[in-house]
Amino acid sequence: MKTFFKPSRRQLLTTALALALTLPCAVVAHDFKAGDIVIDHPYATPSLPGTRTGAVYFRGLRNTGRSADSLVSARTAAAGSVEIHRMVMDGEVMRMGALDKLALPAGSELPFRHGGQYHLMLLDLTSPLVVGDRFQLTLRFERGGEREVTVWVQQPRQAARDSGHQH
């Protein structure tokens, strides 16, 4: 006697619902690796009207290895040039400055979120950054080599928006 599994309508609906709920997570979450460097969810914020600059952030930028590495440059067809920027408090004033490279100590994670200490500045944008757009960005690491990532343009979370960091 052969027995075949015949799922009930309820089991099929439960499975379909579970898949529908997990699919958006798979679409939204995106991370990339360059050697021991993990680039988690690269994103840009919409550019302000009338400006030709933008900024790229990461949900996380981690060096999971036992050796230090450095982010030495970035490039994209979406902008004329890309600079690595650091924000620092100078008394009561927040100042932004370009870095030649950004050290990533072994086992470290850097604050690369909107409103945080670091970001990539996009200069001379070829077109405005609009929510929902995507573009390619190539990151070059001293030890990890080059890695192309997909950057999604999205609104920052409310907490980050309240930080006052605007471009």
Image (cartoon, grey):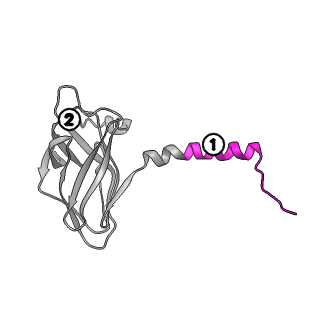
Residue 122 appears in the rendering: yes
Vertical position of residue 164 compared to residue 5: above or below:
above
**Precedes in sequence: disc 2 or disc 1:** 1
Question: Toward the viewer: 24 or 157?
Answer: 24
Instruction: Give the number of the disc on residue 167.
Output: 2
Quadrant (top left, top right, bottom left, bottom right) of the C terminus = top left
Question: Residue at 26% across / 44% down in the picture?
Answer: 56
User: Would you identify the image quadrant in which residue 90 lies?
Assistant: top left
Q: Position of residue 18 (x, y in %)?
A: 62, 46
Q: Position of residue 35 (x, y in %)?
A: 30, 67
Give the residue furthest to the top: 50
User: Would you identify the image quadrant in which residue 78 lies?
Assistant: top left
SS category of the residue bearing label 2: loop
Question: Residue at 30% across / 73% down in the picture?
Answer: 66
Question: Residue at 75% across / 42% down in the picture?
Answer: 9
Residue 91 appears in the rendering: no
Q: State the separation of the CA atoms marked 2 and 1.
A: 41 Å
Task: Indicate whether residue 146 is drawn in magenta.
Answer: no
Q: Residues within 10 Å of mark 1 (few under 14, many from 20)?
A: few
Identify the amino acid type marked 2: His
Q: Position of residue 160 (x, y in %)?
A: 33, 39
Task: Indicate whether residue 8 is drawn in magenta.
Answer: yes
Give the residue furthest to the right: 1
Q: Main secondary structure of the magenta part?
A: helix
Question: Residue at 48% across / 49% down in the picture?
Answer: 26
User: Would you identify the image quadrant in which residue 17 lies?
Assistant: top right
Instruction: Give the number of the disc on residue 93.
Output: none
Which residue is denoted by mark 1 in the rendering?
Answer: 17
Question: Which residues fall within the magenta stretch?
Answer: 1-22
